[in-house]
Amino acid sequence: MRLTRLRLLGFKSFVEPSDFLIEPGLTGVVGPNGCGKSNLVEALRWVMGESSHKNLRAAEMDDVIFAGSGGRPGRNSAEVMLTVDNSDRTAPASFNDADVLEISRRIEREKGSQYRINGREVRARDVQLIFADASTGARSPALVRQGQIAELIAAKPQSRRRILEEAAGISGLHSRRHEAELRLQAAEQNLARLEDVLAQIE
Ligand code: ATP
């Protein structure tokens, strides 16, 4: 999978529709202080399923919506669309029938977010798993925040292990195991309830 295009609409300072083509190789984003470089990386995190507004330097999730500036009124919604080249067919099986995946996240003030993949509404979890399997994603070590290198050096061994596991692409497996464990617990509870009912009938 390869990221090929990022489109922002009303996300933070990007009030006008803005398209960024991501060519193969190294991409650099340069510009003066405050021009929106970090906002761009945060848009990438956000569309990949970031669920913590704190990781996006926002007091609440609605703060990612353009709040108005220089006489321009704020907006009521924001959208980020990420185009992914899936011609190597490495996306999870349920989304692996297309060469190109258009992954979008839209937020409306006080209504929360909605995710889509190729127009089909999906859960945040589905989007997060696509990127976890590809060793990338909102919390991936591939996206390095300002100050993060210093944090890494001072990190506890458990945190370093999590980073290594993400880099190795096995964090998706951990998430799946957790989901499977929850389902197993629910099934065990149902079984226990069934046994109670059977005991009452006998
Ligand atoms: P630096 O080089 O200093 O790190 P940068 O290029 O990374 O700067 P950002 O931090 O991405 O810049 O952008 C900051 C700008 O984005 C500020 O001007 C801030 O007012 C603006 N901004 C952030 N959130 C919103 C929002 N919701 N609505 C409008 N503007 C916003």
Image (tube, helix red, strand yellow):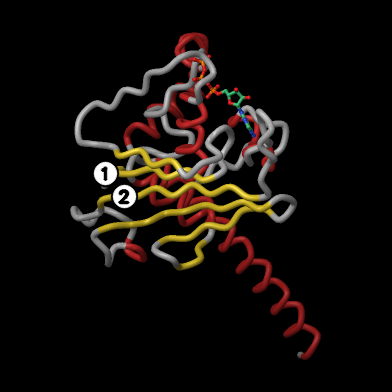
Q: Nearer the viewer, residue 21 or 93?
A: 21
Q: Nearer the viewer, residue 76 or 106?
A: 76
**Residue that badge 2 annotates:** 84
State the quadrant of the C terminus.
bottom right
**Residue type pointed to by label 2:** Val
Q: Quadrant of ligand 1?
A: top right
Rendered position, 182 above or below 164: below
The mark that comes first in sequence, 1 or 2, is 1
Q: Position of residue 40 (x, y in %)?
A: 46, 32
Count of labels in the image: 2
Q: Nearer the viewer, residue 162 or 142?
A: 142
Residue extending farthest to the right is 200
**How far apart in space, not on screen, are marks 1 and 2 (Cα)?**
5 Å
Q: Position of residue 43 (x, y in %)?
A: 49, 37
**With 135 as the anchor, is 104 left or right in this view?**
right
SS class of the residue under badge 2?
strand
Rendered position, 194 above or below 102: below
Q: Quadrant of residue 168?
A: top left
SS class of the residue under badge 1?
strand
**Residue type pointed to by label 1:** Arg
Q: Quadrant of residue 100?
A: bottom left
Q: Quadrant of residue 120?
A: bottom left
The residue that appears at 53% across and 36% down in the rendered structure is 14
- Verify CB contact (< 8 Å) between mark 1 and mark 2: yes
**Residue that badge 1 annotates:** 2
